[in-house]
Image (cartoon, rainbow, N blue to C red):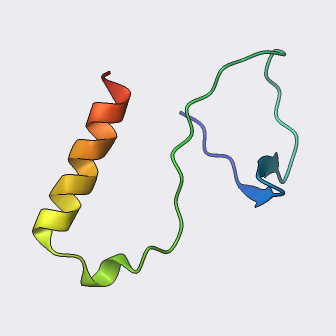
Amino acid sequence: MNRITAIVRNGKIELLEPIDLPEGTQLTIAIEYDLGVESWTQEEWNNLSLQGLNSLWR
């Protein structure tokens, strides 16, 4: 798995540097940003993990 940094502008994801992928390549993107997670409970973390797994295994 490669890690790529991007920004959102006008509702679209824009890469900060070019990548070498064939045209039409489908990607799965994990979004990381400050959610204020330092105060989350174990139950909140578990729910987030379950939601992520469910979205991947539909």
Q: Which residue: 20% across, 54% down?
A: 47
The answer to whether residue 31 is above or below residue 42 is above
Q: Please report the residue visible at 57 percent of the width from the left and 39 percent of the height from the top.
A: 29
Asked if 21 appears above or below 18 in the picture, the reply is above
Which residue is most to the right?
18
Quadrant of residue 38 within the rendered picture: bottom left
Left or right, residue 5 beside residue 40: right
Q: In this view, does 30 lie to the left or right of 54?
A: right
- Relative to 2, 22 lies left or right: right
Residue 41: percent from left, percent from top: 16, 75
- Viewer-closest of 55 and 26: 55
Pick out the residue farthest to the front. Answer: 11
On the image, which quarter does residue 28 sit in? top right
Q: In which quarter of the image is the C terminus?
A: top left
Residue plotted at (86% across, 48% down): 17
Front-lying residue, 56 or 1:
56
Q: Horizontal and vertical percent for residue 32?
A: 52, 60
Q: Residue furthest bottom?
A: 39
Can you say whether 42 is above or below 22 in the image? below
Q: Which of 10 and 38 is in front in this view?
A: 10
| In the displayed structure image, the side of residue 28 where residue 10 appears, left or right | right
